[in-house]
Image: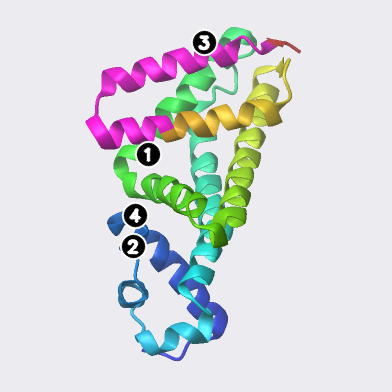
Amino acid sequence: MARMSVEQRRTALIEAAYRVIADHGVEGATTRRICAHANMPLASFHYAFDSRTALLCAVMETAVPSDISRMLDTILPMAADPDARGVEAMRKNIRAHFDAFYTLLKTDPGRMQATISLGIYAHNHSELQAVGKQMYEQLYEVAGIGLDIAAERAGVRWTEPVANLSPVIIATTNTITLTYLSTSDDTAIAKIIEVVVTALSAYVVEA
């Protein structure tokens, strides 16, 4: 294995940890398994991180928000109709965004499962609670950006601050993920999306 800088080791271990958590859960993400996935010797782990807890913090601080941002960048052009304007167009775009998210979820459900697992694990471990909370605040921020972009494209505005609505987006993506992982029930997920779209549309008016 070629010699790696500390920063390269950190990046490789963060990505490996995220993937291992997606495949084996947080409890199954041992340093040995993470190092094996990153193709580096176990002894090199502490050149990059002081502890497994420090690595989990790095995953929540960097990998998860970046992954959701990349997903948003993929969904926005896929779902938005650049020529459609008005409240009804916004309603259709919200639905299209959730449908696009669901399509991406089915291609790699482990990534979203890892995000949810990390949030729960952090909430139940005092040394990670602050970082877990910060992770969700970053996810809300990413969702808020998406809401602003969608409104601008549709020529509408939100009657409620997007900071109050963005948690609904993340809660919905989590619900879709858990429902898919539990049942793979397309009908139930379609109903979840329909209900949330109706609820969010109540906060949309012509600009």
**Label 2: how many Cα within 10 Å (few below 14, some 14–19, many 20+):** many
Q: Tell me the residue that label 3 is attached to.
A: 198
User: Which callout, 1 or 4, points to the residue nearer the camera?
Assistant: 4
Residue holding disc 4: 22
Which amino acid, mark 2? Val
Which label sits on residue 70? none
Tell me the magenta residue range.
175-204
Question: In x, y percent, where is residue 157?
Answer: 72, 17
- Depth check: give the residue in front, 118 or 38: 118
> If the image is split into quadrants, where does the C terminus sit?
top right
Q: Is residue 155 left or right of residue 13?
A: right
- The secondary structure type at the circle numbered 4 is helix
In the rendering, which numbered label is found on residue 104? 1
C-alpha gap between disc 4 and disc 2: 5 Å
Name which of mark 1 and mark 3 comes first in the sequence.
1
Pointer 2 residue:
20
- Looking at the rendered structure, the secondary structure element under dot 3 is helix
Residue that appears at 30% across and 63% down: 28
